[in-house]
Image (cartoon, grey):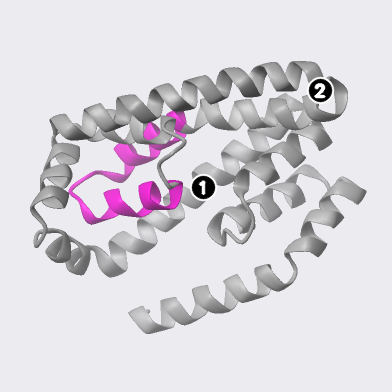
Amino acid sequence: MKIWQIGLVYTVAIVIVFLYRDELADWMQRYHPPLPVAFGVALCFVLFPVLPYKLIIGMLGYMYGPPLGFFVSWSAATLASVILYALVRSSFRERGRAYMAKFERIDKLARFMERRPFAAIFVARLIPVLPQSLVNVYPAFLSIRLSTYATASALGKIPNILLFAYLGNELFANVRNALIVASVYGVLLAATAVGYRIWVKRI
């Protein structure tokens, strides 16, 4: 498939999901669809991010409880990341790598990730301030094996998804616990942001 065809299909899909995003979210809240259907809807929202995925995670956590809500959210997010990685790698890798080579700092970061791919991807997944769509795409331009990317990515997603699945349930069951957990998460978020800045400067 040519690049413009991929772009056209992706654009049409985003428009469709965007137009019906409220209906999809409302349907999930009202009717508690079977897990395979919920998985498909969650996958759709990851691939076409017209709503914040954390909102979907929280909704699934409320609907099915934290364990099942986490599993559906995590499975959908993991599969979506592999799909995007494979799509970008097969169609855009050479162009993307050539473009990155023009910028010294970006190229330096790329070479660092290629030396330590598992650790770099795992840490990137743990840092909530990093756009996860970028983490899905960036490694596909590099010499990183799919197995390494998929494993590190899947493990790195666990803490954040588990947290929001729990929060989605607790917001309706125990607001006090949800506020405590959210506060702790805010502190950790600030700490990881500072740690990330220090880490990047040392690259």
Q: Is residue 187 left or right of residue 119?
A: right
Vertical placement of residue 138 versus 7, above or below: above
Vertical placement of residue 89 versus 162, above or below: below
Q: Which residue is mark 2?
A: 175
The magenta region covers 132-156
Locate residue 18, reporting x and y percent.
66, 69
Element under disc 2: helix
Report how far apart the C-alphas of labels 1 and 2 lie in the structure: 32 Å
Look at 72% across and 21% down and name the residue there.
179
Hey, which quadrant is residue 166 in on the image? top right
The crowding category of the residue bearing disc 1, from other C-alpha atoms within 10 Å (few below 14, some 14 to 19, many at least 20), is some
Amino acid type at mark 1: Leu
Locate residue 110, reporting x and y percent.
17, 46
Which of discs 1 and 2 lies nearer the camera? The answer is 2
Q: Which residue is mark 1?
A: 79
Decide whether the magenta segment is chiefly helix, strand or loop. Answer: helix
Tell me the quarter of the image containing the C terminus: top left
Q: Is residue 54 left or right of residue 3?
A: right
Hey, which quadrant is residue 164 in on the image? top right
Locate residue 160, reporting x and y percent.
54, 30
Look at 86% across and 29% down and name the residue there.
172
Vertical placement of residue 4 versus 98, above or below: below
Q: Is residue 23 left or right of residue 13?
A: right
Amino acid type at mark 2: Val
Tell me the quarter of the image containing the N terminus: bottom left
